[in-house]
Amino acid sequence: MKYQRSVRFLADYQRLDDDDRDRFRDAVRLINRAYEERRERAFPRWPVSLRIKGVQGAPGVWEMTWSFTRPDGRATFSFITIDGELAIRWRRIGDHRVFEEP
């Protein structure tokens, strides 16, 4: 699945430790696999383990949980179109603080 990363996401990502970066990349692999297996559906059936859902009070912004360890891993994103295909724009990554400005 194609993607873009916001400037805030890139700064947040740099603050993650190597283990958290690995956990996030594992979650992205699950998203990519779901996207590849979507068949005719516009949107994939996202893995339940990632708890993908809309962010309350932020229309068009979605969240996922990529880790339940300390600190809990969260990422926010929006759906966009790149080259006519559904894509993700990663907005923020980190812990619950990402919801302050998702």
Image: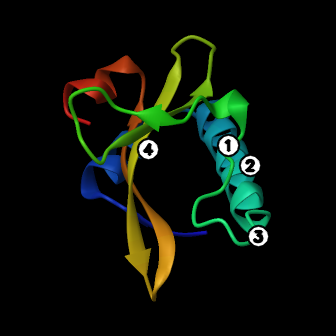
Residue tagged by mark 3?
39
What residue is at 21 percent from the left and 28 percent from the top?
57
Residue tagged by mark 2?
30
Mark 2: amino acid: Leu
Residue 46 sits in quarter: top right
Mark 1: amino acid: Ala
- Of tags 2 and 3, the one toward the viewer is 3
Residue 96 sits in quarter: top left
Say which quadrant the C terminus sits in.
top left
SS of the residue under disc 3 = loop
Residue tagged by mark 1?
27
Q: Which mark is residue 13?
A: 4
Say which quadrant the N terminus sits in.
bottom right
Residue 99 sits in quarter: top left
Q: Give the CA separation, mark 1 to mark 2.
A: 5 Å
Please say if the residues under marks 1 and 2 sit with CB atoms less than 8 Å apart: yes
SS of the residue under disc 4 = helix
Mark 3: amino acid: Arg
Q: Is residue 23 visible?
A: yes
Q: Position of residue 8 (x, y in %)?
A: 26, 48
Question: As drawn, which residue projects farthest toward the bottom?
Answer: 83
Above or below 95: residue 80? below
Q: Give the CA separation, mark 1 to mark 3.
A: 20 Å
Q: Is 65 or 14 nearer to us in this picture?
A: 65
82 sits to left or right of 6: right
What residue is at 50 percent from the left and 71 percent from the top?
86
> In the rendered structure, which disc, 4 or 3, sits on the residue that comes first in sequence?
4
